[in-house]
Amino acid sequence: MFEPKSRIPPAISLVASALGLSFATSSTLDYAAHLDRGLHDLHCSFVPGAAPTEAAEACRTAMYSPYAAFFRDKYWGGIPISLFALGAFTFFAGFALYLLIAGARAPRRAVGFFAAVGMTPLVASAVMGTISAVELGSFCKTCVGIYIASFLLALGVLLGALGLRGDDGGERPRGSWLVPAAFLLALGAVSLVPAAVYASSMPDHRPYLDQCGTLKKDPEAGDALSKMTGKRPVKTATFFEDPLCPTCRAFHQRLRAEGVLDRLDVQLALFPLDSECNWMLSSAMHPGACTVSKAVICGKDRAQQVLEWAYDEQDALSRAGKVGTPTLRAVIEKRWGAALLSCVDSNETKQVLNKHLHFATENGIAVSTPQVFLGKQRVCDEDTDMGLRFTLRHLAPELVP
């Protein structure tokens, strides 16, 4: 009776490890595909190998976040955390297969060691799941797949550990400490060697970081740009942003997560992709963006606060903008009051927004947001997401302590 029961826990662990290995491999391949600085589809599905879906945005949010990789200031994009998960699940699959084959002959120390280390993915998943909920506000499906695999693995190793308590008759040998020691070395190898190989094969993007042009005209008082000055500014910057642009919101959130905004003295040029005020468009890409941009301008010393409110409430503001200007104005008034709304409606604010747009045309800005300049150097669009920290380290090292 003991022999079949002794194989159930490692069988569960083996299935869980294979599941985790599948999701970790998919996530790592998605990450590695972006090392060419291009934009690619993401797998982002509970079904390994499935076609990309609309849910990929949550996976992209996770991939672009500071929590997706290690050594991001040393390597463009860093070394993805999923690569270490891939190595760990490979190890657990091998260990579970060994215990499954050995059955009751597997030493107690080997089973005990497997129970101890087999709980670590669950701990890591709990930490990453909390970050996804609290910091990112979304869950990528491949990440959730790894969380589920980690739970099943923990269940398997826990059942195996409980099985040792029923082995009072001494049917299972105690075994040598060399077995868990050997497996510990194997765990280190399968976790670190792939990371080393990955790092050594990464392309060198440094020659391309400063190849996207410079600011033709420095901001002047007459341009009436909005100001966003951090608590400890060490670098000037010029941003061209649309408060209803999802890419701008994501970029702003990445800067905030990196702690970079506090170290910048930003001149903000509002560039709404809305034909209501922007003559460079024939139709509105982001209806209502002109009105929200005026609200940011009217924030004056609170411009950053209004902009970040717009980003935090972007989905609601975008829906209101599509309904119509009166609905959008009501949302702004509810949050910021009648005085700011009166400023939004003024001819003076309309002229200031025109100056922002003229400043963009004087600098030859493409009809696309965000556009980011550190000093006079433009940050390439390709380097504002995964490679952001690496780019900052090389273009403005004072921003990355």
Image: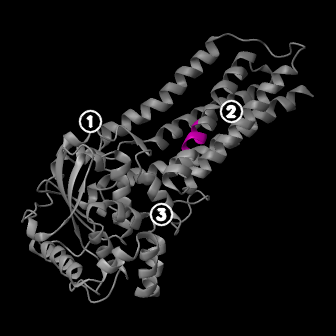
Above-or-below relation of 197 to 223: above
Q: Quadrant of residue 156?
A: top right
Residue 401's tag is 1
| Disc nearer the start of the sequence (2/1) | 2
Q: Judge by depth and name the residue closer to the eye, 380 or 217.
A: 217
Residue 290 horizontal/vertical position (percent): 31, 80
Residue 241's tag is none
In the structure shown, which secondary structural element does the residue marked by tag 1 occupy? loop
Quadrant position of the N terminus in the picture: top right
In the structure shown, which secondary structural element does the residue marked by tag 3 occupy? helix
Residue 97's tag is 2
- Asked whether the beta carbons under mark 3 and mark 2 sit within 8 Å of each other, the answer is no
Which residue is identified by label 3?
A: 57
| Disc nearer the start of the sequence (1/3) | 3
Q: Which region of the structure is painted magenta?
A: 124-128
Binning the other alpha carbons within 10 Å of mark 2 as few (below 14), some (14 to 19) or many (20 upward) gives some
